Amino acid sequence: ADVVGNRQNFVGYMAMRPGVEKRGSHGLFNEKDEPIILNQAANEIAEHKGNVWSHVVSLRREDAVRLGYDNSDAWRELVKRHISDIAKAQNIPLCNLKWYAAYHDTTHHPHIHLLVYSTNPKQGFLTKAGIDKVRSVFANDIFHDDLQSIYQEQTVSRDELKAVSKNEFESIVNRIASNDHTDPQLEELIRKLYIQLQNVKGKKVYGYLPMEIKETVNKIFSELAKDENIQQLYEKWCGLERLKYKTYTQKETELPKLADNKVFQPVRNMIIRTVLNMKPFDANTEIEGSEPN
């Protein structure tokens, strides 16, 4: 009885509270064009035997006005565009998914309340990953133009970091070949990788290498990432990544170190290719962890 009463009250709150944009006698809407009978919808939701999920999707006032999401029609079309994404995130077959929403034109944070459930009471569950998916599809649609400029700038920043890393590493390798390098730790790792790569069969790309060789590559990448110019470029990339996250949430996000970031996996393969192209070392060169020839 409490569940039924609470659900009825909540549907009434969604549809009639001050600030709701009414579509006739109340603010409730779904994908259908015919008017919704409020009492009928409230009873349907209240008496549903399964779970009913309640989402709130909110924007800052300035963003809602700037992007045209200061009216219920825009929100309704947004939900309709992504109802299949919502169904997938909620693990409900699209044919069984039902939803109702209402737009509340509040001063600082215009928002919709969105109720979602399945006609089959046994269907549907929602995980944190599902919530993140719903948030992501809405944000990517609402902020499409804003995000496109960030994506483009981030691509340029990523490519610049890869190019600088390549130039710097090739310079290091050339200095080692000329006996003009002053970082013995990095030189030892590069020489070790060279010998390891000579003794491995099959594709000489990071994903196919034995774990001990991957570890050597990872250590070289970690040393290369200490370069000041590379650090600055990575911080620029991270700044853009944080901007993207702020589109979805106000929380700060922790980003991995450059050498641990899978986005920059191509740098590892660049290291491998460059070392493979080095001129052969002296046959008597001894590397820690390997036998002299």
Image: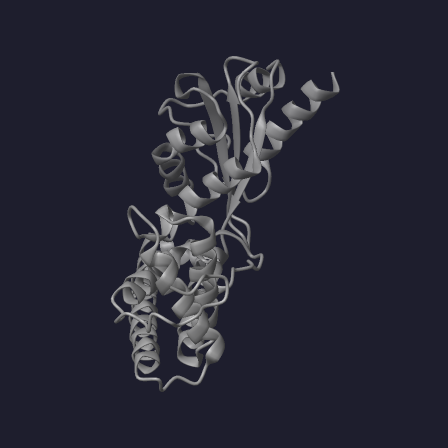
Q: Name above or below for residue 202 compared with residue 266.
A: above
Total numbered circles: 0
Residue 278 vs residue 207, the one in the foreground: 278
Q: In this view, does 99 lie above or below 50?
A: below
Q: Residue at x 37, y 32 (%)?
A: 80
Q: Toward the viewer: 273 or 53?
A: 273
Q: Position of residue 61 (x, y in %)?
A: 49, 57
Quadrant in which residue 180 is drawn: bottom left
Residue at left offset 50%, top offset 14%: 119
Q: Which colour scheme is used?
A: one colour
Could you tell whether 244 is left or right of 178 in the image? right
Task: Confirm whether residue 237 shows in the render.
Answer: no
Q: From the viewer's perspective, is 113 left or right of 163?
A: right
* Rendering coords of residue 185 (x, y %): 49, 75
Q: Residue 220: which quarter of the image?
A: bottom left
Residue at (45, 68) in percent of width and height: 287
* Quadrant in which the C terminus appears: bottom left
Q: Position of residue 76 (x, y in %)?
A: 40, 36
Residue 282 visible to an observer of this rendering = yes
With respect to residue 85, does 152 lie above or below? Answer: below
Please state, as top left, top right, bottom left or bottom right, where the N terminus lies in the image. top right
Foreground: 284 or 227? Answer: 284
Q: Up-down: is 39 above or below 281?
A: above
Q: Where is residue 283 in the image (x, y as percent from the top left)?
A: 34, 70
